Image: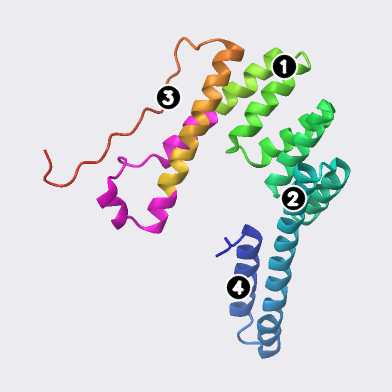
Amino acid sequence: MRNISRKEIALFIYFLGLGLFSCVYSDELAWSLKEFPRYLGNSISAQSSADDLLRLAKRSYFKKKDAKTAESQALEGLKIDPYLFGAYELLSIIYYDKHDYPKAQSVLEKLNKKDPTNHRAYLRLSVLYEKTGREESACLILKEGEKNFQHFIKQYRPAGIPNESDKREMTKYEKKSLKTYKKFQTGLKKIKSRREIVCGPAEHAPGMAEPLPVAKKAGGG
């Protein structure tokens, strides 16, 4: 089942509030009940179109080797959905392969601003900064990524890594949080490894996330 986007949630809250506020006005309430499915349908359709364009763009570039068409499709997808993060990543690859480093840097900086949880944006920006002679910027973006990911890990850090028996009893939200936590751990490891190459090993990195202890069964030794 497709995840509901923030835009769809906002639309739902808006029309729900409008409906409640307009209860005393039957015409307005009838309008809101009639129009909400249309607006929601349009939103879902637009998101689907953006995702389809991204899939087409990836196929155009990686399978057909048609950079011009892929770029056009990815840009069109971003017009529909400015938060189509995969389109930013694809465009950065297209521009990098064309040695158009300023454009690659521009789209990655936009991606980094919109989605600071994407570890690849930090890594690729550091490579671009190095290629354009900005070693200090390469080091700074990696340090920023390391700091951000430490914060993300702290937010999602569970009490302990559950064993298989515990996992069966976890709620869907708890499972998702654990998956997100592990993803951030992986991202932090990659950023840290790259940062040590670019900046040199840090003398002290406070707050570094350590592996979680495995949860023991109740009554276990």
The stretch drawn in magenta includes residue 169: yes
Horizontally, is 184 left or right of 175 in the view? right
> Label 2: which residue?
82
- Type of amino acid under label 2: Pro
From what the image shows, is residue 103 above or below residue 173? above
> Label 4: which residue?
17
Determine crowd level at label 3: few under 14, some 14-19, many 20+ residues with C-alpha closer than 10 A. some
CB contact under 8 Å: marks 3 and 2: no
First of labels 2, 4 by sequence position: 4
How far apart, in angstroms, are the residues tagged by discs 3 and 2? 33 Å
- Type of amino acid under label 3: Met
Horizontally, is 70 left or right of 165 in the view? right
First of labels 3, 4 by sequence position: 4
Residue 22, horizontal then vertical, whole percent: 64, 81
Which numbered circle lies on residue 130?
1
- How many marks can you see? 4
Residue 1, horizontal then vertical, whole percent: 55, 65
How far apart, in angstroms, are the residues tagged by discs 3 and 4? 44 Å
- Type of amino acid under label 4: Gly
The stretch drawn in magenta includes residue 167: yes
What's the magenta region? 147-176
Quadrant in the picture for residue 144: top right
First of labels 3, 2 by sequence position: 2
From what the image shows, is residue 180 above or below residue 45? above
